[in-house]
Amino acid sequence: MSRDTARGWGFVAPALLWTLAFFVVPFVVMGAMSLATLERREVVWGLSLANYAELAEKAYLWRAVLVSLEITLTVTVVSVVLAYPLAWIIAFRVPKRWQRLALLLAILPFWTSYVVRSYAWLLVLAREGVVNQTLMNIGLIAEPITLANTRFATITGFVHFFVMLLTLTIYANLVQLSPNYRRAAMDLGANAFQTFRHVILPLTLPGIVTGAFLTFVLCIGDYVTPQILGGNTELTVPQVIMVQLGRRADFPLAAALAIVLMGIVTMAYLACARWLRLDRI
Amino acid sequence: MTRLPALLLCSTALTATAAAAQEELNALVWCDHTDPALIEPFEQAHNVKVNLREYEGTGAALALLDQSRPGDWDVLVIDGIDVFRAVEAGILAPLDGVSTEDFFPEVVMAENNSVDGVMYAVTEKFGYNTISYNADKVDPADMESLATAWSDKYQGRISIYDYYLPVMGLAAIAGGIPTAEIGADDMEAIGGTLSAMRGNAASVAGVVAAQTALATGEVDIVVGGGEWLTAVLAGDQPNLTWTIPAEGAVRWAQSIGVVAGTEKPDLAKEFVKYIVSPEGQARLATSSCFWGMPANAKAGEFLTDEQKAVLRWDNQPDYLARTQLYPAPDADLDVEMQDLWLETLQQ
């Protein structure tokens, strides 16, 4: 081994060891656990696919996968749609000297506890909460409508959180764009919409996709928001995992569910890989 | 110049000595034990620091203990119906010398706290999973029967406590099935009742969410609630109350024991003795996290009349006679019950 090669390995070794210790080993253990079984409350190690078969057999398990996917995709799309204009306004409409303050205000909700924020939303969406009271006062509804303890509440809580995240990634992408791109498009006869559609949007896709991917990953694995705001009216995969662990300590089935989640995230990554550019944010 | 380092060394040594002098006790507990008003008298009396770690779910606690080294934990608080699981796993040490003669006889539960005639734990607190409600919003007469408490009349105004054992116990009682006799053959009947209950419920909520829902008017009834849910709210909202319907309700009980392999068995046993002493019991019963009846009847001497009124002290003989301990399924039945519960939630 040449000296340069040895030095290269020396530089890479900490990262490799870190990845090995905190990703590869836990993943292998979780994979092995998913192939074990729980017999009379004891984990029996083996190479059984019984937990995965159970996923196919029990309707509530695969329905949890579907619920998780539906909520996550809705949150991702709604968050992108709301975050893009916000990032645009901060990047191009807010004067430079105020941009930092605008960004600070945009991420202000990050400073509060995640759990407290979820309970706050529960109060806002309650039958006697701010939203219902406002709608009744302006005469849009006569009776309070059910907003809390629904999928709508879960999505609202998630969107509030992830719009902040996406605003940051998209803003970071937008401010890197030279104004010459827009000027050139205008000079060539493009109107504002065409400029956005054919020039700005493709160039900001890395920021959008990176933020959307992070939103997808964090949302599909979240337990707190659906537990507090969804009212258990339907269960997501993390909620079902917690039930398996709480009383029965069924770690093998919980591990199988976690592997399924990981599979979904991997597929999402492969779908986004072309545009994922972390160096652009 | 040499004085300062010497002084620093001296003070460091003194600090270390003082720290070494104070023993530590590690207890795996439910949130009601984390109230300083409960723990501090014991710490002061024994010059000990009690380190408390909360957990939810017996499975999680047993897994945590399984991953620990012998001696890491000294005391365990556990669901009364799960003591045998901890004993089977070799987690609890035999417990002798803790008297239960002043306890309410119905909650001594020797059959739950002993295995093969050896006592491993003692009951420390109990209460009821029954019907909590807002007396200003519902007809209290409807709450006196399980048949009307979760009927269509209250559709969308009900929250169900998010724990399958007590709620399925209530469903069994509503169908005339004793909780101790629930078997696989009863799942269909219990499932039907659960579905009806679920169909009229706005949410299935944990402790804090259920309290929030009841206090904010999001729901008017909590199925599976009880004094542990409404007692801490009673000061501000006396209209939030609870009852035990004519058919009866489910009784919960928590036990405390010494962890096998502890290096401080005497101190751990002293802690258990303190918790089940009349004074400790009164403090545990009125813990800031949740209230519940003390197992030791002599705790009444340390409770105020107002506290006893909230706990319904004088009603206990009637309540104890009309309630059943919640289901304690074996491993196979537990799987069936949990599956049925999750299927119902996903409907």
Image: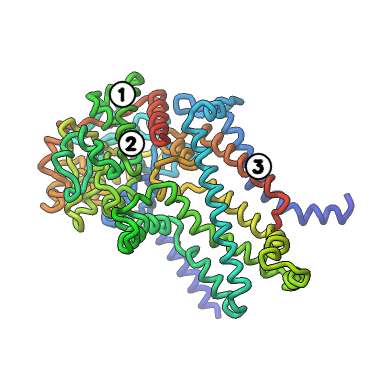
Left or right: residue B264 versus residue A6 is: left
The quadrant holding residue A180 is bottom right
Q: Read off the residue under disc 3.
A: A267
Q: Read off the residue under disc 2.
A: B199
Q: Read off the residue under disc 1.
A: B189
Q: Nearer the viewer, residue A160 or A214?
A: A160
* Amino acid type assigned to the residue bearing label 2 in the image: Gly
| Marks 3/1: CA–CA distance | 42 Å
Q: Where's residue B35, x and y in %?
A: 30, 54
Assign the C terminus of chain B to one quadrant of the image. top left
Chain label for disc 1: B
| Marks 1/2: CA–CA distance | 16 Å
Q: Secondary structure at mark 2?
A: helix
Seen at 58% across and 76% down, the residue is: A94
Instruction: Work out whether disc 2 and disc 3 sit on a shared chain.
Output: no
Left or right: residue A22 versus residue A224 is: right
Q: Where's residue B41, x and y in %?
A: 26, 55
Instruction: Work out whether disc 3 and disc 1 sit on a shared chain.
Output: no
Count of labels shown?
Answer: 3
Chain label for disc 2: B
Q: Where's residue B73, x and y in %?
A: 41, 43
Q: Secondary structure at mark 1?
A: helix
Seen at 59% across and 37% down, the residue is: A259
